[in-house]
Structures are given as C-alpha cells and as structure tokens.
Amino acid sequence: MDIRHFRYFVTIAETGNITKAAEKLGMEQPPLSQQIRRLESSLGVSLFRRQPRGVSLTEAGLTLLPHARLILDLRRQFIEDAHGLAQGKKGHLRIGLAGAVPLLPSIPFAIRQFSTIAPGVTLSLEESNTPALCEALLSYRMDITILRPPVPDQANVKVIPLLDEPTLIALPKGHPFTSLPEIHLSRLAAEPLIIFPRELGPGFFDAILAAYRDAGVTPSLGQQAPQIAGTIPLVAAGLGVSIVPQSLHQLHTGGVTFHRIARPAPHATLAIGIRTGEQPPLIHHFITVLQQACKTHLTLPD
Amino acid sequence: MDIRHFRYFVTIAETGNITKAAEKLGMEQPPLSQQIRRLESSLGVSLFRRQPRGVSLTEAGLTLLPHARLILDLRRQFIEDAHGLAQGKKGHLRIGLAGAVPLLPSIPFAIRQFSTIAPGVTLSLEESNTPALCEALLSYRMDITILRPPVPDQANVKVIPLLDEPTLIALPKGHPFTSLPEIHLSRLAAEPLIIFPRELGPGFFDAILAAYRDAGVTPSLGQQAPQIAGTIPLVAAGLGVSIVPQSLHQLHTGGVTFHRIARPAPHATLAIGIRTGEQPPLIHHFITVLQQACKTHLTLPD
DNA sequence: CATGACCCATATATAAAATGTATGGAGACA
DNA sequence: TGTCTCCATACATTTTATATATGGGTCATG
C-alpha cells in the first residue's frame, strides 16, 4: 500500500483501461495489472471490474477514488511545500532583536520589505539583550538575531557586521548644555551616567566607557537602567545623563533633549547573529534584505 | 517519496533518535538513516539536525511534520474505509424496486432495518418496471433490484425468489359485487380488465391472464394503466376492474373496494435480482436482511 | 462462422531498491 | 582519557518491482 498504488489506482480509473494507464504511467501492462491486483488483495476489496473492453470501477472503487486523489494531492503539496521551504519562500523565521533595535528605522523597514517579498514566510519578533539572544539562538529558540557585538560564544555564533550607529547624549530638559548642538564627553565628567547593566550589552557598554576614557575622563556611574531605552525616563527624571543610539531620538519623551557627541564618540554597533555552519536559504535571504535595507535606508543624523 | 518515508519521518521526529526510531519501526538503524537522508535529498531540504545526542527537527521539519502526519492518517483511513467496504459495513447501494413494491410493508421495513444495522451504508431507491430494472442492473446503474420475475436476461441476472404475494380484485365503489368478500374470476368475465402494459411486468401480467384462463374465462382488456398501481384510479373512475397485489389495499383511494379472489387466483411473485457471478458482502448482507424481513414480517391477509 | 484485434492474466527473468551486517567516527560524560 | 551513545558509511543480501513472452477470453468484421 504505497503512494505508487494510489497513483496506479487513480490512473486506471481515469483511463478505464489498464493497458493505456500503463502507457500513461510509463510502464508495461503486466506489472500494472499485478500491482493493482496486489493492492486489491491487500485491501480485501475489488476496485475494478475486469471487462472485455477494459475495466470499470466497482462501487468500492468509486467510493475510494476521491480519497485516493486527495492523498495524491496532499503528497504533491507536501513536496511543493518542502521545495518552498528549501528555497526560503515558505516557512517561519524567529527573529531576535537586541534592546532598542526596533527603533532603528532600517530594521522595521527591512522586516516589512521581507514579508512583502516572501509572503509565505511568517515572522516572529522578540526583543531581548545580546547574551540572551545568543543563548536563544544556540538552543534553537531563535533563527536569526540582530545584536550588539561582541557575543559571548564566538565559536558557535557567526557575527555579520550590519551597521555602526552614531550615538547621542541625552540630557534632562533645562540642563545647562541644552542649547549646545554638540557636546564633548569630557564636559560630562561630573554628570552621573545612566546606563544599562553591562551584562545586557557588554559591547555597547564598553564602547561608551572607552569613549569616555578616550576623552580623558571617567564617568561617575549613576542609576542603572533596566535596558538601553530604559535610560531615557531616568534622564528625564533628572537622575543624570545618558549615551544612547541615535535612533532613540525618535522617542519624543518630554523632558529629554538629544545632542551630538564631539569626537571621540562611541558607536552603537549592530550585527547579525546566526548559528555557525548553518545558513538555510530563508536566513540567507533575510540577511540580504537586511543588509540592503541598512545600506540604502541609512539613518540620517538629527 | 513513499508512504514509508512519511512514517520514518514521523517516527524519528517523535523519538528524536534514529536508533530508537529504527527499533520502533522494526528495522535496523543504518537503513533508516539512509532512507531519511534520501528523503531529505529528494525534498531538497533538511528535516533533522544531527546532534551528538540524537536528532532534532529543523524549522522545515517542524513545518512539514503535521502535514506528514495528516497523510499517514488519511492513508490509514483509506485502508479502514476499504475494509469497511469489503465487509459491507460501508458504501452505497442503489436499489431498484418494481412497480408497487414499496407498498409491500416488508420492503420499507427491511430497508429501515438495514440502514439501522449498517449505518455506514447510504441507500438510493428507484422505482421502475422489471425489464428496465434488469437493464439498469446490467449497466451497473443499480446494484440490487426487487422485481417481478421472469426476467428477460436469465443468463446475466440472478433471480432469487423472495415471496409470493396474494392478489386482490379492485372494484369500483357501488359495483354489484361490492358486498362479496371473495370473488371468483369467472364472474368478472364481462368486466373490462384494467391492466398495465405487458412490457412493464410480463411475469405478473401473464400470471393474471393465466388465472383467468384457469377460471375458464377470457378477460376483456380495458384501458391500459401506466403502471401497476396506476390501475386503481382507473377502476375508481369506473372504467373496469383490476387485479392488484394485496399490498395495494393500503392505497385508501376512495372509490375502490378490494376483494379476495377465489381459486384459481394469480400471485404477484417478487424476487431479488442481482448480477450473476457477483455478490459483494454489502449485497449479500442486504439480501439476508430482506429475506428475514419477508419471512417474519409477513403481509397478513385483509 | 472464422479471423483478427483488443485487453487482461500468468509465468519467468531481470533489474532496482530497501534492508541487514559490520565497522568507523564524532561528540558527551565521567 | 577512556567509554558510551549515536549517526554515517561500505558492502552483502534479500525483497520487490518491473520487463519480456505468452495465453485466454471477448468483441467486431469479413
């Protein structure tokens, strides 16, 4: 009772003639007769009446025929689905985004574009911190991530640089520097720096501290924010200043002003993270769209 | 891409372990590995990730798994349906009934009983005349018939006697004999006999004429009725008398009275007609129910 | 009524494919 | 580091499907 038997059954039913069916199937008549006979005996029911001028369906055959057609159709669809999956036209992609990444316009743009190009692909998005993203990636709870390098497990996560985003200083409204469009970090030495826990994004964290160091000062660390975007309300509350990716200026939170940073300024580096040694077409496809979007749809400075 | 491959795929997915899946499938591990590998390459997509402690589904595998399960379920159902058909528990039966047969209580009783016993079987009923029934039977438009023997094509239609139904005389209301419970045919010699065309039921037709002959008279043939039950309105209209199967007394047509016939009296013989050399369980089953019903559920004389 | 055409069934031979056996290799765990 | 687990590979074997050759039965045709 194989797929083959279903095909034989349906073809014979359609031609009403074993000899012609065999020809249509690209085989000889005797094996086809034999297979159908075997099928009938295994089912315990006659599907065809052997008549002098051919064969005709029995009542049982007539009843079972649509069922057999259905199974053949489903099999065909299964194979087509598999090919679609193989080519990255169908499937599901679990995307992990590092903190504040959704605020960078290129990212939602790329995602919208991808779902237009590959309508058969469903996407799920999740925002988390870089180390958690890596872990989710390695335990196959995610398929692709946009994270802030470096990553803890260099060996198992392949990191593909995506873009370097400038950063801005966030000052509470009414701060003496509010009128300055560009500020040197050295002038912020006295201000408590609101920053996220280093574990949530060691790369960006270290980049900020390194810029301070290059500017010749050491920041005084103020209150810890629960995440990158979480620094803004704390700044607004007057608890200090913070350094954030440029895209956060979109958050029109009252009580905060954003200012360019004079060199040396940190960058918020974003990269694509995938499992090493694995790059299905679906993922490859998504990466291409992402890179293209970041190239053409550049974030303009304020 | 066989049914087998679907089963392999699903079993491995369920155990997460090729070795254990092979055991479950009653085969060795290497061929199973090989078959899955072959399946994957024919689909052009990886279904499993090979890991040190077993295998796990890829995204594509996860997507395709329910589809594979569905196909396996449908195949199982197909086989079960076939077995049901083989045992006469499922299917469809096209039943042909000779004229006025539905009026014989045993017949609807048997049909109701059968549909209770075999709920998986759908029935279709059609009323026609005996020669037409035989033709429909032989051209596979009917599966079983209840007809009035003899049949034209003795060779290809197997006739199984079912019952002999007594006949009644139908008189128009107000006829001089209305008060007699039993009438001898010789007394009807003068009355025009309303009868159906001989082609529609030669057996019953000849039985009626033979009874007249045995009674020593020759009937004068009156108007022809379009069918057996169709004689009644004509009798009611006063155009003559007629001889009908006993069951027709159920037709409480005003204007007609029914009377027993003194010997010699014709009988309305009914028989089951099926194709010779063919007796699927479904048909056999129905015949059994029919015979049982006719035996126990005898039509009582008026 | 005989002959040829058509179609399905059977028998045997051949080719293909799946399975079994034996073995190797890679990673996990102690 | 050694052992265990589990999958992959190589080769032998068996099963299975298919091809070839042939026979029987029915229908149409001369």
Image (cartoon, coloured by chain):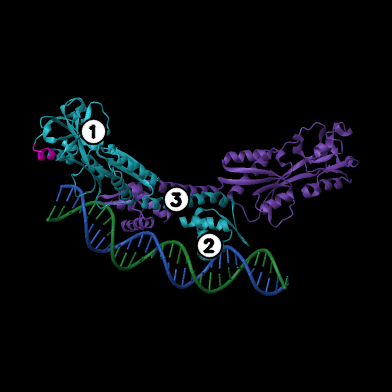
Chain colours: A cyan, B purple, C blue, D green
Q: Mark 2 lies on which chain?
A: A
Please check whether the numbered discs 2 and 1 fall on a single chain: yes
Is A131 left or right of A77, judged from the image as shown? left
Asked whether A211 falls inside the magenta stretch, the response is yes
Residue B129's tag is none
Would you place residue B47 above or below residue B175 in this image?
A: below
Residue interval drawn in magenta: A210-216
Mark 2 or mark 1, which is nearer to you?
Answer: 1
Residue A229's tag is 1
Which tag, 2 or 1, sits closer to the chain's start? 2
**What's the residue type where badge 2 is placed?**
Lys
Is A280 left or right of C24, judged from the image as shown? right
Residues at discs 3 and 1 in contact (Cβ within 8 Å):
no
**What's the residue type where badge 3 is placed?**
Gln
- Judge whether residue A301 can be spotted in this image: yes
**Numbered disc 3: secondary structure:** helix
- Can you identify the residue that label 2 sits on? A24
